[in-house]
Image (spheres, rainbow, N blue to C red):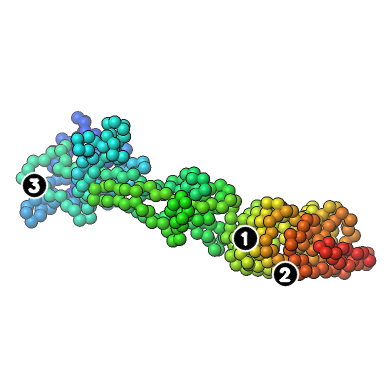
Amino acid sequence: MKKIRILLSVLFLLVAAVLMVSCSSDTSPYADYDKEGYNVSVKYDANGGTFSTNTAVIVDSYDISKLPANSSGKKEITLVSPDNEVRDPQNTFIASRTGYFLAGWYTEKLPVTDGEGNHLDSDGNIAAVSGKEGAYTYSGRWDFENGTFAVDPSKEYTSHTPVLTLYAAWVPQFSFEFYDIDTGELLDTYQFDPMYIQSLKVPVWNTETGELRMNEFPEVENKTFNGVYLDPAGETPVTDSEIAHTGVFNPANATATGNAMKLYLDLLDGRWYNIYTADQFIKNSSPSGNYNILADLDFTDKIWSTTLMHGNFTGTIKGNGYTFKNINLYQTETSQINTGLFGSVADSAVIENVTFENVTLAIQTGSRLPTASFGLFAGTLYDATLTNVAISGKIVITPTPLIDESTTIGLLCGMGELHGIDITGIRLEALAPEDEYTDPITVTADGNTVVITVG
C-alpha cells in the first residue's frame, strides 16, 4: 500500500493502482506514476455526483507490463467498480447524488439535442432558455463482472490521459406520491432506487396486535388508512398486497419514464383498530378509540378496561355481527360516579351491530355515591348512535349502609334513553348482608329503573 498526500492513494489490487484526484492540476503527481510504470489509466467521472471521498473523479492506473495478454497480444484490463469492496474499506468509492439513483457507468455521454443542435433539458426545452440542467443520453453500459478493456502494448501511454472514461449516469429517483382522495392534498412522497425496489407493500393489519402496519405509507395524524386507489375518482382500488411501480427504466441508455406514481388514500377519521381477540381490545382500549370487530371476543378471566368502565366513550365500535361475552365489571371505586360497560356514552359515539352477552355488573359495599349512575351498559347514556345493539346479563347489588336517594341504578343505564335496546335479558340479584348490622335488601325493576327496598 502506497499513499501520496490527501489527494492520492495507491492500491495494489491484483496489478492495479488507484489514483484519486479532485481535478487535474500541476501538483498532481502523474509524473511519478509514469516513472513507476503506472501509465495506463481509466477515469471514473462522478458526472454531477460526488464520491464518498468528496471528490468528483477517481482514476485507476495500471502497470502495462503486469497486465495479462489476450490471444491477439493486447493487454487486458479487468475494471473494478468504484464501490467494490475488494478495493478494501479505505479505498471504496461510493458515488451519490441527492434525488438521483446511479443507473450505471457508461462509456459514452451525449447531450440530448433538438434538430438545430440545441441542448435540451429533461422536459424537452432548450436548457439555455429554461435555465435547467441539460439532459444527456448514455451508451456502452459497463459490465464489471464480465467486461474487459484491451490496450495495445506497442503504444505509449501517460497516466494523465486515460485510455477510457466511464461516466456515472444519474436518473431521478422513482417515487410514490400519496394523496388524500377526499381533499387532493399531497400527504407525502416516498423516493427509492428502482434498481433495488420495484414495488410497495400495502398497509396490513397485524392480527396479533390489532394495529395497522403502515410499511412505507405515511401516517396521518388522527386518521387511519382504509384503502388505496390508483385514480383520484376512487374507481380503481388496489386489491393486491403490493403495488408495482409503473415507471420504466431503460439501462441501455440510462433513461426513465413515469418516475413518479400517484396513489390516492382513503382515510378514516380517528385512530382505528382491527380487533380479533379480547386481549387486543383490552390493550388498545381508549374512550376515544375506534374499533372494527372481526371475531367473537371472550373476556373470561380477563379484566375489562377501567378507562371504558368509568370513562366517557366518544369513539366507534363496528361490531359486524360479532359478540362480546363473559364480561365481569366490579364497581368498588368510591370516586367514580358513572359505571357500566362504559361509564358514559357520548352523543358523538357510534356503536353498531354488536351483542354484549353474559355481562355482570357487581355493585359492591361502599361503592354508592351521591348523584352516581350505574347501568349494565352505561352509567349515563347520551344521544349516541346505537344500531342493532343487544345486551344480556345481570346486575348484582351488595347491601350497604351508604344508600343515597340521589344514586340512580338502571338495567341498561342509570341515566339516559334506552335507544330501543331490549332490556329483558338483564336480571337483578341482591346478595345477603355479611353482618348482622346491615339490613337485607330486595331489588326489582320498574322498566329500566332499579328499585332497592331495605329490610
Closer to the camera in the image, 135 or 432: 135
Residue 225 at x, y percent in the picture: 53, 54
Q: Which residue is mark 1?
A: 318
Q: Earlier in the sequence, mark 3 or mark 2?
A: 3
Q: Which residue is mark 3?
A: 152
Q: Are there few (<14), some (14-19), or many (20+) residues within 10 Å of tag 2?
A: some
Q: Earlier in the sequence, mark 3 or mark 1?
A: 3
The image quarter containing residue 31 is: top left
- The amino acid type of the residue labelled 3 equals Asp
Residue 316 at x, y percent in the picture: 64, 56
| Residue at point 28%, 47% (across, down) | 255
Q: Quadrant of the N terminus?
A: top left
Q: Are there few (<14), some (14-19), or many (20+) residues within 10 Å of tag 1?
A: some
Closer to the camera in the image, 416 or 452: 416
| Residue at point 27%, 51% (across, down) | 250
Are dots 1 and 2 in contact, CB under 8 Å?
A: no
Q: Earlier in the sequence, mark 1 or mark 2?
A: 1
Q: What secondary structure is marked by label 1?
A: strand
Are dots 3 and 1 in contact, CB under 8 Å?
A: no
The image quarter containing residue 377 is: bottom right
The Cα–Cα distance between marks 3 and 1, rounded to whole angstroms, is 78 Å
- The amino acid type of the residue labelled 2 equals Asn
Q: Nearer the viewer, mark 3 or mark 2?
A: 2
- The amino acid type of the residue labelled 1 equals Lys
Q: Which residue is mark 2?
A: 358
